[in-house]
Image (cartoon, rainbow, N blue to C red):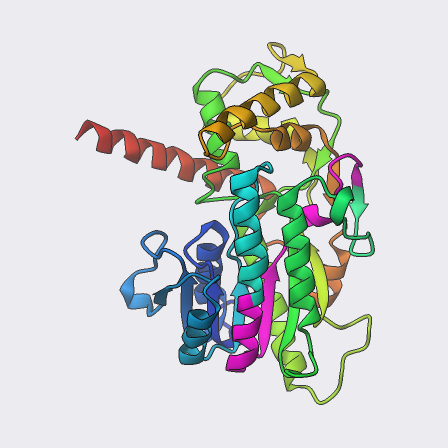
Amino acid sequence: MATEKTQKPSLGRVLVVGGCGFLGHHMVNVALRDWTTSAVSVVDVRCQRNRRPESDGVEYVEADITDADNLAKVFGRLKPDVVIHTASPPAQASGAVSDELFRKVNVEGTRAVVAASQQSGVKALVFTSSASIISDNRSDLINANENWPVIRGKNQSEYYSETKAEAESIVLAANRAEAYPNLLTASIRPSGIFGEGDVQAVYHIVNIYEQGRTGVQVGPNTNMFDFTYVENVAHGHLLAARALLLTAQSKTVPLDHERVDGEAFFITNGEPVYFWDFTRAIWRAAGSDKGTSHVWEMSRELGLVLGFLSEVAFGIMRKPPTFNRQRIIYSCMTRYYDISKAQRRLGYKPLVSLSEGVKRAVQWTLDQKQAKAAAAKN
């Protein structure tokens, strides 16, 4: 963002909740690289992975965000100006184990983050929501924007999205709340996050290539999908945080077409692609030279049956399934978004293109696999 001739904008004291996770640690990296900060701290349930070098001065605090009393004490000690709340279990199909975790972390944890922010005098709170909260997992989303309704209750078939929607409503309701009018909030709705550190989508797709299973495709590949490189998602959050700080400093309330506080924003790469074209781009980056002549098209219906059986089997073992109906639904659904609101109000523009993001993500994955294989030999 900033060049040698421009001064980096300031965010003050920044706290990233979930800052050792996939998105969270990129949030820390981008904040340190592109912004001026007086302090950067991380709260995560475990802080052993994705840590910055000690010389960077990031403070890591292990805390469970569902422990509201302890979290309030941590916030009170750190006294952040900006809180970026990224903590969430990874999206997966519904089940007794995952549903309990989704509610505990996404809803009750977010409620605790909001309360701790209010009590400690936080100025700007930005929440990581999900673009999936406007999807019923049946209807296509074609250039969908923030005017589309959030899908809740019986119409929302994915409990992850249900809890993300509830969490977003909690965060946005806290904006300029009567008891704590100085806290400003915003929500970011990313779609299809991928990048270095992604041990779900990209890692899984590379595994399929390495296992020689590139000959199966679910559906006819006529569905467009929005994928978003992780640094661009982090960039969108930090732009929102900066806008909230500027609003807090202003003596006037922004006009409706300008305001960021109390608002939600879709963030993507702005480059929707056919779903299986993205998958094959990952395979090519991993070394594949095959086209599509060897591909067999599996029906969506058969994929859903196999996904359900996988969920049942893993549910008996009380483990999250490695293959599920959600993946089948995603691979056949049209889902892309209009990001013009983020462009206008946040000044958002992707930092990294989709093709460059794929190269970086695949190289990271291959490096990790190579390191793991080398360690196994020793």
Q: Residue at x 41, y 69 (%)?
A: 41
| Above or below, comparing residue 292 to residue 159 in the picture | above
Image location (x, y in percent) of residue 98: 53, 42
Q: Which quadrant of the figure has residue 118?
A: bottom right
Q: Is residue 26 magenta?
A: no
Residue 194, horizontal then vertical, whole percent: 54, 43
Relative to residue 295, is residue 41 drawn left or right? Answer: left
Magenta residues, start to end: 112-141
- The N terminus: image quadrant: bottom right
Residue 228 appears in the picture as rendered: yes
> Vertically, is 21 above or below 260?
above
- The quadrant of the rendering that contains the C terminus is top left
Residue at the image point whose x is 48% and y is 22% from the top: 209
Q: Position of residue 358 (x, y in %)?
A: 53, 38
* Residue 115 coordinates in the image, percent (x, y): 56, 73
> Is residue 130 located in the magenta-colored stretch of the structure?
yes
Question: Which of the pair 316/230 is nearer the observer?
Answer: 316
**Identity of the residue drawn at 50% across and 52% down:** 23
Would you say residue 9 is visible in this rendering? no
Q: How many marks?
A: 0
Q: Residue at x 71, y 24 (%)?
A: 221
**In front here: 341 or 177?**
177
* Quadrant of the image occupied by residue 242: bottom right
Work out whether residue 110 or residue 52 is closer to the camera in this orientation and state it.
110
63 with respect to 251 (left or right): left
Which residue appears farthest toward the left when viewing the image? 378
Left or right: residue 188 compared with residue 34: right
